[in-house]
Image (cartoon, helix red, strand yellow):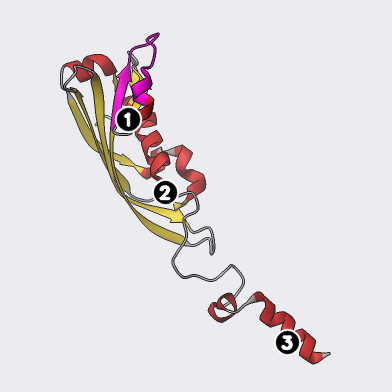
Amino acid sequence: MKLIGDYFINSLKFAFEGRRLAGEVPVSCMRRLNDALADDAGELSWEVCGDCDDEGKPYLAVVVFGELHLKCQRCLAALDFGLCIRSHLQLVAPGQNWPDESLEDDRFDPIEALEEQPLLPLLEDEVLLALPIAPRHDLCALPGYGQDSAAASPFAALALLKKKH
């Protein structure tokens, strides 16, 4: 069985030949996600397809989907996060100037074409870009506080202290 870390493609050749690879990757293999995760259980499904647009420019279509268990930034508990990424990565040959229109067109993201493009970092980059900046539950308590005290105003505790004195 071939592991995702073993996949390398010549990105330009892959795109011009219209090739396709797909599989699953354990979340635990994506080490750069560790800080955002409550746990690294599960797998993500992925697919990378090469093609050329109407102008003959090569690109990679990347799809990643599955579920991650992110760490809620309020309560630090697990937060289920459904992932469904569809990216078009325009390939720019090494040494070639990046056209100005690529910076204006948000339908695709330009990346440098590599003769030995590792797929795991490519997929991991797309997942990292899709994560929320500060994931949190819609309703949750701060660590060390009950549900009632989290919903109460912080000034309510000061009012109680004032009444006692």
* Percent of width and height locating residue 98: 38, 16
Query: Residue 99: within the magenta?
Result: yes
SS for callout 1: loop
Q: Earlier in the sequence, mark 3 or mark 2?
A: 2
Quarter of the image where one finds residue 52: top left
Q: Earlier in the sequence, mark 1 or mark 3?
A: 1
Nearer to us of marks 1 and 3 is: 1
**Residue at label 3?**
160
Give the Cα distance between marks 1 and 3.
Answer: 57 Å
What amino acid type should be assigned to the residue bearing mark 3? Leu
* Percent of width and height locating residue 111: 36, 23
Of residues 48 and 152, which is closer to you in this image? 152
What amino acid type should be assigned to the residue bearing mark 1? Asp
Q: Which mark is residue 40?
A: 2
Of residues 56 and 50, which is closer to you in this image? 56
**Residue at label 1?**
105
Residue at position x 45%, y 60% from top? 78
